[in-house]
Amino acid sequence: MIIVDSLSKKYGGFTAVDHVTFRAEPGRVTGFLGPNGAGKSTTMRIMVGLTPATSGTSTVLGRRYADLPNPGREIGVLLDASAQHAGRTGREILTLAQRTMRIPRDRVDEMLDLVSLSDEESDRRVRDYSLGMRQRLGIATALIGDPEALVLDEPANGLDPAGIRWMRDLLRGFANKGGTVLLSSHLLHEIEVIADDLVVIGNGRIVAHGTKSDLLAAAGTFASAADLAALAKALVSAGHTAEESLGGVRTDADPAQVGRAALAAGVPLTELRPADGAGLEEMFLELTKDDAREEVAA
Amino acid sequence: MSTATVMENTDTAESERPRVEHAPIPFRTVVGVELRKAFDTRSGFWLMVAMAATGVIATGAVLAFANDSDLTYDNFGAAIGVPMTILLPVVAILAVTGEWSQRAGLTTFTLVPHRGRVIRAKLAVTVMIGLASMVLAFGIGAIGNVVGSGLRGVDTVWDLSFTSILYIVGADLIGMMIGFMLGVLMRNSPGAIVTYFSYWFVIPTISGLLAANQDWFEKAQPWVDFNYNQGQMYDGGFDATSWAQLAVTGTVWLLLPLAFGLWRVVRAEVK
């Protein structure tokens, strides 16, 4: 369990993180979503003590991060896969982590296997690694201590589609075994396919927070028809909202209500489904748009 | 800003794993890891190789080119010691700055979330490497001295007293501490190395010129020029005034900046 309580970080007059409060539960994958510069990385750096908070607290497994006796064995952290000494080999970087955590040496080979870095690749210096290889190495470093929680900042960056799929399965498995996963992304789709819970941040503030299913339900239904105007009119007269979006209409009604309204108005539907991705994406853009505007105005 | 859905706590799986209380990481582990880090990069490795190589080449050069009367322990020691004196502080600089310049600190300081401990371990490693290198230097020098005098058929001259050796070791350690201080203060490899070489090569020239031309500076120099005091140590024979001068300049040029650097290091953001 990771608890972040009213965390703030000010840089002079600029508030990078503004009273951020959320929790990441064990057994669940919590997605930390926000546009670039929204404060995700700063929040995560504060959580692990790399950046001092201006105010607020955060705890991991019931303790402040700095009070964990051997943090690598309780929480695996990957903040930036490129933040490694370029002159070390991948194997050496894992060995340093293994020695610091005082765990058996064969964990290094186990982790290299797990993230599919071959012997030859692991003996190369990190400067010659692709971003994808660095991410794999970073995930190996985070997992080597067999921790109970994971904090990963943009872990999918640089991974190819197969790699993203692999990571998704890995994190799902980790959560299913009771682990706590917090991962950030600025890409909605990436988070949507893996997260159980979502924390959406915009301009340093939490703008939405809840289970994915709740947030998706809040996003309503997507329907399409040859005559969009007629469909929208039918929905509005049935007392629902209707908003044209992406070649269809998005509404707060559930699919059954949309179907009834369309039938009553005699509008043949060509598509009818929960708004899901598209809805959440619009919500994401909308939620962060206000803050983005404030930013410009300031 | 409108939405703030309260998070619903649905089917949260209880942690299946029993909580294990892990033992804290002992300081010797941190020191061991930091020692390994001094050698496991290309720059660290070749720096060590360069020091060993210059030591051997310097010994060979003394053997090959020195007059018989110059085949003394002092000269062998100096031949090896000078390159080492110059390179050891670079080892100290890189030990600290790598965490920032190479951003390795992101991992280091999350695995050991007490920066003071990591920095203390680095200091311990710096001193260990310094002492080990000096033992090696004096050892190679002694071998060179015995072999050299034997080859030339002259008497083996041991003209370096134990006290002078202590002075040299002290001066070299101060040099390493200057490197360490610059590393902590600047947290940037090129910046710290350039500053260090300026301290080593540029300042003595300027202060030497100044002392030669300005009487007042010649008198003041021992009280303001740390480099000068450090240089005097290689000749040994300090009296109470010399120690006081070293203490004054050392406090101003080494301890105070080091304290300021450490104060900042434990507070600064690691990005």
Image (cartoon, rainbow, N blue to C red):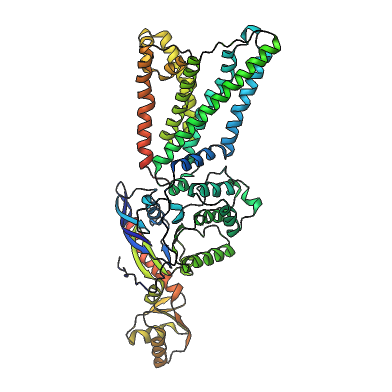
Between residue A192 and residue B52, name the one nearer to us.
B52
Residue A151 placement: quadrant: bottom left
In the image, residue A48 above or below residue A236: above
Does the image show residue A221?
A: yes
Which corner quadrant holds the N terminus of chain B? bottom left
* Rendering coords of residue A194 (x, y %): 48, 68
* Rendering coords of residue A207 (x, y %): 34, 64
Q: How many marks?
A: 0
Does the image show residue A290?
A: no
In the image, residue A102 above or below residue B223: below
Between residue B115 and residue B155, name the one nearer to us.
B155
Residue A286 placement: quadrant: bottom left
* Rendering coords of residue B124 (x, y %): 46, 34
In the image, residue A13 above or below residue B128: below
Residue A32 placement: quadrant: bottom left
Tell me the residue at 35%/24% (across/down): B252
In the image, residue B50 above or below residue B107: above
Q: Is residue A26 left or right of residue B154?
A: left
Tell me the residue at 54%/13% (across/down): B160
Between residue B29 and residue A255, name the one nearer to us.
B29
* Rendering coords of residue B181 (x, y %): 42, 31
